[in-house]
Amino acid sequence: MPVDPEYLHQYYASLSDEALLAIDREELVDTAKNCYDHELGQRELGSEDVPRTEGRHGVPMPPHHADGKAES
């Protein structure tokens, strides 16, 4: 089934930053990847903005500073 790029642009634009970043880009088809990447660029988000997870439950880890200490 063909993918409608306009629908994808609208869908990704409707998501919160957190919901957008929760999408696993590697599971997307090429057209969806392009739309996803475009929306990330529009919001100036990147892979460094994806919360780190620990274990299989996807519990976000606190951000770490360059000195290796976690934020509290």
Image: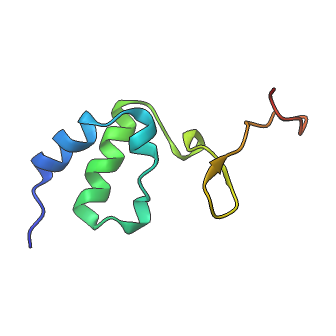
Quadrant where the image shows the C terminus? top right
- Residue at x 62%, y 59% (from the top left corner): 57
Query: Residue placed farthest to the front in the image?
Result: 57
What's the image's color scheme? rainbow
- Residue at x 12%, y 48% (from the top left corner): 7
| Towards the viewer: 56 or 28 | 56
- Would residue 15 appear left or right of 51 to someone viewing this image? left
Total numbered labels: 0
Residue 34 image offset from top left, x and y in percent? 28, 54
Residue 62 image offset from top left, x and y in percent? 73, 37
- Residue at x 19%, y 49% (from the top left corner): 8
Query: Residue placed farthest to the bottom in the image?
Result: 1
Q: Where on the picture, by quarter, is residue 15?
A: top left
- Residue at x 34%, y 32% (from the top left corner): 42
| Towards the viewer: 18 or 6 | 18
- Would residue 71 appear left or right of 42 to someone viewing this image? right
Quadrant where the image shows the N terminus? bottom left
Q: Where on the picture, by quarter, is residue 63?
A: top right
- Would residue 50 appear left or right of 64 to someone viewing this image? left
Query: Residue placed farthest to the top in the image?
Result: 72
| Towards the viewer: 46 or 21 | 21
- Would residue 11 appear left or right of 56 to someone viewing this image? left
